[in-house]
């Protein structure tokens, strides 16, 4: 190569792709961070991830040699992002051989690119190989000329890849490391302890040459492959002469913008610098995730996004000087400005990215304040229990008799210490100590050692508390672990284990989908008796076909015949039945033959292109090899097609009305309805919904042609076809163009589903609901054709019935209902006013009956209060009117006795405590209580004992007065 070596990140990208394109590689665009059609991956984490089906032999690659610059995201380093080296998002340069060239060419070209194109001196490079890979070692030493002392043997931990799961493709790898110089670790070699500052891995060459079975036995692959990866951030740092990616042209401008926004000087304070790097990295990562369709949620990839957003917000709030500022949105805007020329999705989805980040940041700032208050309350509950109960009883068990009530029950029912913490958190604290001391009255017989344990663990946070904060308030567990010590709360290994157990229980339903390659191999083994060959699909042009039964499974086992009543999975030589995919449900119908009939309820494609029909034998005996006539339920199929074509039209209408940031996030196309999930940050207003519906129905009335086409995926998407979320597409794909021609179609999308010939066949489109699924994702449900007609008939019938009940016409019914609602509202207000007047009269009567107890005015009585708020309001009024005194009011609310005690400020200073009063009042009622010196509350179980509790409260006042 002539001229200067590439040093900018843009030039490095271009040089890499050009180098391998010259060597026969097909340059592939970066795939989405959401793995298409691969439930085994949370996010795209490696350059080879989009090519897994090619390596596995499930799909034919467009070329045996591929090269790409792939967007990647790895979750393993989230907690350490903020140092100089770690990232979540990165770009991976990679070249791939799928059964073509192998070690010699992979090694030769890697060395040629690094030392030739990049002009890195060979003396700055070290090589690692797997200790068993004599072939790779020999190539590096004998053919490339790397000195033997610079080739280091390492084991499986460092230099062996895969399999991803319990079995599958795997192989040794060889890495190229850059040496920053002797001054960083004199005399060290790659892999030595303490040598990380000296050596940087820049390129990993994976030699995919074995298949490992479930027993760990490795057999050579018939067609070995190559999978390489070079992180752009790392090689850019080397080429630009810096030690950190945050100082490269990839991240430095964003980091500088962030520091300017925060009004800080980068490099002046280590903690501030760390916060700047956290926000810089997470803003970039979040922008790319959102642009690819990830939205914040409490599970899966949505939780990863929420976690990095909230971690960035937390660092901004706690480490930066200007804390009342939104940082993520403007930082992400800088990311979009600088990187959208390489990744157009950032520009296309820019509005979505910025709005979603602003919403999530504002939401978390509110949650951060709430959670901080909750952590403070948890600390207070635990300190109270430790100091007022556990410590005393650990030192002197005989003092049990002086402890009034059972404080854990009071905490559980919300009467201990007041506060706004949710009951789930209070219950968690109570459960923790009851696991040590026993429930209810069991604590009376607990050994003294148990109270010692309770005292010693009093400030230990439980995994359940961490889970509640994460699940209910979106406060990441990792942040709770980090900030809890600031509140005097301990985080132990038991805390972390408890949280993981809670999360494991929550994830249980979806765990089967995360079994790695093994899940796919299990499916292959299950359906091997059916042949695994793709089933020719005839259903685009025919709803019936003469075919042959190619195989049957009953209860997962291959059978040669199936009798009446048997449930079987059936494969046909060819089929008109559409297998579920792209949101469209599988076809139903029947399979008939000489002397047998099968009712088909579903069609699926579990592996490759194999189509499996779920069926029940309703007549005769069906045998493998029998001739059969397969017929799809035509009416059901046409209902499905109406909804599927309408789904494409809805998508187009949403993009017209709401903006091009709208993208599909999921769908269901069934015969009776359609459901469409899409990205949008706000609820869709009634006016917008009406306009969306109008746009679709206008296109239906225009009776637009629905043209189905076929072409190379890259060509049709380049021509403007929109690809649907979550689907993996083969090299050649089907498309649906609704109306118009090149560039002016109503809708043009990649889709392998079945569709109508013209939009007029839909009949009518009706939106029946719009709702939110989480941050940035909305859902519309709609009906078409006969379903829409039935829905309208039902609503009109309902209107007629309501009008009849009101003795009004349908036109007059809404006005009549409004009048009735106003009458009800007036009656409620009148009843409330009457209740308040009655309560005031009752309070005035009680004030006149105030008694003198040891020189203190006391109002103590059972009252008629419908709610705790009403009881407290009555107490507030009496306390204010007394001027100086004690109020103890009780009421039976929801079948349970409750008592509120209030003490005026002057008496608090003289030693009267509302908390002590309710502690005395609670035991007679069979409960517990607590609170502040001026206001406290007690609850019990036995409503018949309310007066006993009130009497005990009065005696508690008398005891203080002597």
Image (cartoon, helix red, strand yellow):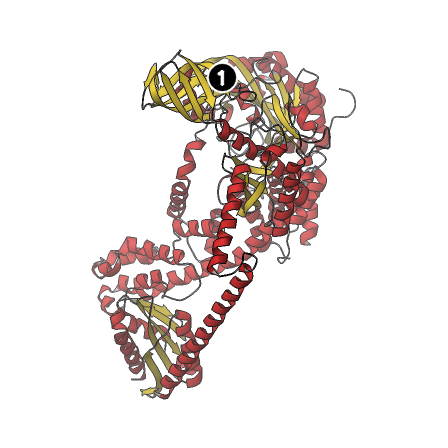
> Residue placed at 46% from the left, 75% from the top?
830
Image quadrant holding the C terminus, namely: bottom left
Residue in the foreground of this view, choosing between 711 and 803: 803
Kindly state the secondary structure of the residue where label 1 is placed: strand
Q: Using the rendered view, name the quadrant where residue 757 is placed.
A: top right
Residue in the foreground of this view, choosing between 429 and 186: 429
Q: Residue 643's spot in the image, x, y percent?
A: 55, 35
> Residue placed at 62% from the left, 12% from the top?
143
Q: Using the rendered view, name the quadrant where residue 284 is placed.
A: top right
Q: How many marks?
A: 1
Q: Residue 836's spot in the image, x, y percent?
A: 43, 77
Q: Is residue 128 left or right of residue 657?
A: left
Q: Is residue 468 above or below residue 839?
A: above
Q: Residue 460's spot in the image, x, y percent?
A: 38, 54
Classify mark 1: residues with Cα within 10 Å, few (<14), some (14-19) or many (20+): some
Residue in the foreground of this view, choosing between 599 and 5: 599
Residue in the foreground of this view, choosing between 559 and 952: 559
Mark 1 — residue? 545
Q: Using the rendered view, name the quadrant where residue 788 is placed.
A: top right
> Residue placed at 55% from the left, 43% from the top?
780
């Amino acid at each position: 190569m002539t001229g200067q070596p590439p040093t900018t990140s843009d030039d490095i990208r271009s040089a890499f792709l050009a180098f391998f394109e010259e060597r026969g590689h097909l340059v592939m665009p970066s795939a989405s961070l959401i793995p298409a059609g691969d439930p085994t991956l949370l996010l795209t984490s490696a350059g080879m991830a989009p090519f897994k089906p090619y390596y596995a032999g499930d799909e034919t690659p467009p070329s045996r040699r591929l090269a790409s610059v792939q967007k990647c995201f790895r979750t393993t380093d989230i907690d350490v992002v903020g140092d100089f080296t770690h990232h979540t998002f990165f770009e991976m340069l990679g070249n791939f051989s799928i059964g073509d060239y192998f070690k010699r060419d992979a090694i030769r070209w890697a060395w040629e690119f690094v030392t030739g194109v990049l002009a890195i001196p060979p003396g700055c490079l070290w090589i690692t190989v797997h200790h068993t890979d004599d072939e790779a070692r020999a190539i590096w030493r004998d053919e490339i000329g790397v000195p033997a002392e610079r080739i280091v043997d390492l084991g499986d931990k460092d230099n062996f890849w895969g399999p991803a799961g319990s079995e599958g493709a795997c192989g040794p790898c060889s890495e190229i490391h850059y040496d920053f110089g002797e001054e960083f670790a004199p005399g060290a070699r790659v892999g030595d302890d303490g040598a990380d500052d000296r050596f940087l891995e820049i390129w990993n060459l994976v030699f995919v040459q074995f298949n490992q079975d479930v027993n760990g036995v490795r057999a050579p692959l018939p067609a070995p492959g190559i999978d390489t990866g070079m992180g752009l951030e790392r090689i850019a740092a080397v080429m630009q002469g810096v030690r950190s990616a945050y100082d490269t042209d990839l991240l430095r401008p964003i980091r500088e913008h962030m520091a300017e926004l925060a009004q800080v000087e980068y490099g002046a304070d280590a903690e501030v610098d760390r916060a700047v790097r956290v926000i810089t990295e997470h803003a970039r990562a979040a922008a790319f995730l959102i642009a690819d369709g990830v939205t914040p949620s409490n599970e899966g990839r949505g939780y990863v996004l929420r976690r990095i957003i909230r971690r960035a917000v937390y660092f901004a709030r706690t480490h930066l000087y200007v804390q009342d500022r939104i940082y993520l949105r403007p930082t992400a805007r800088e990311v979009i400005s600088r990187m959208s020329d390489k990744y157009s999705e950032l520009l296309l989805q820019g509005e979505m990215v910025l709005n979603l980040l602003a919403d999530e940041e504002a939401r978390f700032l509110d949650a951060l304040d709430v959670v901080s208050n909750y952590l403070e309350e948890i600390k207070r509950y635990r300190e109270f229990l430790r100091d007022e109960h556990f410590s005393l009883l650990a030192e002197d068990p005989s003092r049990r008799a002086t402890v009034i009530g059972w404080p854990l029950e009071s905490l559980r029912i919300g009467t201990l210490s007041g506060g706004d913490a949710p009951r789930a958190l209070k219950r968690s604290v109570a459960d923790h100590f009851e696991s040590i001391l026993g429930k209810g009255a069991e604590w009376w017989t607990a050994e003294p050692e148990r109270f010692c344990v309770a005292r010693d663990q009093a400030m230990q946070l439980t995994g359940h508390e961490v889970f509640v904060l994460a699940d209910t308030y979106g406060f990441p567990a990792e942040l709770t672990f980090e900030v809890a010590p600031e509140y005097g709360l301990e985080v132990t290994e038991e805390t972390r284990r408890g949280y993981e157990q809670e999360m494991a229980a929550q994830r249980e339903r979806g765990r089967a989908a995360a079994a790695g390659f093994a899940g796919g191999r299990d499916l292959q083994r299950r359906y091997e008796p059916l042949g695994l060959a793709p089933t020719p699909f005839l259903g685009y042009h025919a709803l019936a076909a003469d075919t042959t039964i190619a195989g049957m499974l009953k209860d997962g086992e291959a059978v040669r015949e199936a009798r009446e009543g048997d449930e079987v999975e059936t494969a046909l030589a060819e089929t008109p039945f559409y297998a579920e995919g792209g949101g469209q449900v599988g076809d139903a119908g029947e399979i008939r033959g000489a002397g047998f009939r099968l009712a088909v309820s579903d069609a699926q494609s579990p592996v490759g292109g194999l189509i499996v029909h779920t069926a029940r034998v309703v007549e005769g005996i069906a045998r493998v090899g029998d001739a059969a006539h397969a017929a799809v339920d035509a009416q059901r199929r046409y209902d499905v097609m109406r909804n599927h074509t309408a789904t494409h039209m809805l998508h187009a209408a949403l993009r017209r009305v709401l903006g091009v940031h709208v993208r599909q996030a999921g769908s269901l196309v069934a015969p009776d309805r359609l459901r469409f999930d899409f990205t949008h940050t706000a609820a869709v207003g009634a006016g917008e919904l009406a306009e969306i519906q109008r746009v679709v129905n206008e296109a239906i009335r225009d009776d637009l042609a629905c043209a189905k086409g076929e072409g190379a995926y890259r060509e049709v998407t380049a021509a403007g076809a929109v690809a649907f979320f979550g689907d993996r597409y083969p090299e050649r794909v089907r498309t649906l163009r609704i109306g118009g021609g090149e560039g002016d179609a109503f809708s043009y999308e990649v889709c392998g589903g079945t569709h109508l010939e013209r939009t007029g066949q839909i009949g009518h489109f009706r939106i029946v609901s719009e709702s939110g699924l989480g941050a940035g994702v909305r859902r519309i449900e709609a009906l078409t054709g006969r379903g829409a007609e039935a829905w309208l008939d039902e609503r009109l019938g309902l209107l007629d019935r309501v009008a009849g009940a009101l003795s009004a016409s349908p036109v007059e019914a809404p006005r009549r209902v409004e009048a009735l609602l106003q009458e009800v509202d007036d009656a409620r207000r009148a009843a409330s006013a009457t209740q308040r007047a009655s309560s005031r009269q009752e309070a005035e009567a009680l004030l006149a009956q105030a008694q003198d107890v040891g020189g203190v005015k006391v109002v103590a009585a059972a009252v008629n209060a419908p709610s705790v708020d009403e009881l407290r309001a009555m107490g507030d009024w009496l306390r204010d009117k007394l001027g100086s005194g004690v109020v103890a009011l009780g009421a039976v609310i929801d079948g349970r006795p409750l008592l509120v005690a209030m003490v005026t400020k002057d008496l608090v200073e003289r030693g009267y405590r509302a908390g002590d009063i309710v502690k005395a009042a609670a035991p007679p009622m069979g409960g517990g209580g607590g609170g502040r010196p001026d206001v406290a509350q007690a609850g019990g179980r036995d409503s018949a004992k309310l007066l006993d509790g009130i009497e005990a409260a009065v005696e508690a006042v008398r005891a203080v007065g002597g």
